[in-house]
């Protein structure tokens, strides 16, 4: 009599075992790592940081947004008893010609003195440092970095002295009696901002230049490409992500600049240098309209966010390729 086949229960068990997914060693390790990563004790260690984040960032941000919808004043009847006014501040903002003039000044200041001037001069200094003698590179780099590490208030007083009647700039222009801070205020504060911030671009772009493969540049040189053609056709395209990141950081830093301009001109003469941070301060602390000043601050955040989104969209192809 031959051997009997498996019973119904044994056959069902074998079928279930064959259909079950085979768990490889790698999958087992990954599942184990995930279980270790999401242990309940992890939340205990994260809790202090989460409390600080909520208390020092999230709650003040929500409260600031709320103040933008109120009639809060620094002094006056609404200093203590302020109330929710809906979109009144935003309606005033949209119809405020000084605000739109301030937006224009902000874009000119950020694009002119920051994005364009700092990036171009920083790239020039980085290229100089790549090709120049060690002594020249060290000397130029030291002077440029010294301007960057100086306190912003010190830079403001230096350029305030330069721009006054009888200052160095008016002497160079051959018109020592002219007060350039009164006749060309936005240009002077833009030059001061560029002078101070160029070192940052120089350091970032110098690091980017060191990451350009020498083999690519040598191959282009063997093909007969000159220096400028290699720079614009090879070096700069390879450094595109570094340049865009540098421009993003410059934009974030420059759009919120307050100390330099306020110490030099206080937004004047008139409103000729009242970029958004300065105009926000004037409305909130000189005209006592804290609620409206907060609304201007919210508009500044929105503008900065929109500019950042533009940069991130430009960087997306590089991020995907990595």
Image (cartoon, rainbow, N blue to C red):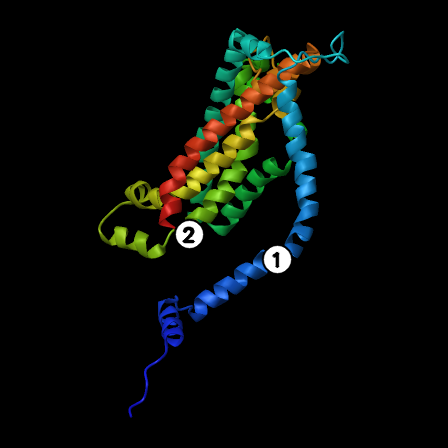
Among the 4 quarters of the image, the one containing residue 84:
top right
Q: Position of residue 135 (x, y in %)?
A: 52, 49
The residue at 44%/67% (across/down) is 26
Q: Position of residue 189 (x, y in %)?
A: 56, 21
Q: Is residue 318 visible?
A: yes
The residue at 47%/38% (across/down) is 246
Q: Is residue 93 above or below residue 260?
A: above
Q: Position of residue 162 (x, y in %)?
A: 61, 22
Among the 4 quarters of the image, the one containing residue 79:
top right
The residue at 66%/43% (across/down) is 50
Looking at the rendered structure, the secondary structure element under dot 2 is loop
In this picture, residue 255 sits left or right of residue 83: left
Which numbered marker is on residue 211? 2
Q: Which residue is mark 1?
A: 39
Pick whichever, 26 or 240, lies toward us: 26
Specify which label sits upstream in the sequence, 2 or 1: 1
Q: Is residue 27 above or below residue 145?
A: below
In this picture, residue 37 sits left or right of residue 154: left
Pick whichever, 164 or 10, lies toward us: 10
- Sort mark 1 into few (<14), some (14-19) or many (20+) by Cα contacts within 10 Å: few
- Sort mark 2 into few (<14), some (14-19) or many (20+) by Cα contacts within 10 Å: few
> Which numbered mark, 2 or 1, is in the foreground of this view?
1
Q: Is residue 78 above or below residue 140?
A: above
């Amino acid at each position: 009599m031959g051997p009997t086949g498996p019973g119904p229960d044994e056959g069902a068990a074998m079928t279930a075992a064959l259909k079950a997914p085979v768990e490889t060693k790698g999958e087992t390790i990954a599942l184990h790592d995930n279980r270790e990563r999401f242990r309940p004790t992890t939340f205990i260690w994260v809790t202090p940081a989460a409390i600080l984040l909520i208390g020092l960032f999230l709650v003040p941000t929500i409260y600031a947004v709320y103040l933008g919808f109120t009639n809060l004043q620094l002094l006056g009847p609404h200093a203590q008893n302020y109330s929710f006014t809906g979109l009144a501040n935003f309606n005033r903002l949209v119809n405020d010609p000084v605000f739109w003039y301030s937006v224009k000044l902000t874009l000119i200041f950020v694009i002119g003195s920051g994005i364009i001037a700092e990036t171009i001069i920083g790239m020039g200094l980085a290229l100089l440092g790549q090709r120049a003698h060690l002594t020249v590179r060290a000397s130029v780099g030291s002077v440029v970095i010294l301007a960057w590490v100086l306190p912003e208030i010190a830079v403001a007083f230096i350029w305030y002295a330069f721009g006054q009647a009888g200052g160095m700039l008016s002497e160079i222009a051959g018109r020592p009696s002219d007060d350039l801070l009164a006749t060309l205020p936005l240009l002077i504060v833009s030059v001061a901002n560029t002078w101070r911030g160029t070192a940052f671009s120089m350091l970032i772009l110098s690091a980017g230049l060191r990451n350009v493969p020498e083999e690519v540049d040598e191959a282009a040189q063997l093909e007969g490409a000159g220096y400028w053609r290699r720079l614009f056709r090879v070096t700069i395209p390879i450094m595109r992500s570094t340049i865009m990141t540098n421009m993003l950081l410059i934009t974030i830093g420059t759009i919120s600049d307050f100390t330099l301009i306020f110490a030099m001109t206080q937004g004047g003469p008139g409103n000729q240098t009242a970029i958004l941070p300065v105009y926000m301060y004037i409305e909130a602390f000189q005209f006592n309209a804290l609620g409206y000043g907060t609304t201007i601050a919210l508009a500044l955040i929105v503008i900065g966010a929109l500019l950042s989104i533009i940069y991130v969209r430009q960087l997306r192809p590089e991020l995907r390729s990595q």
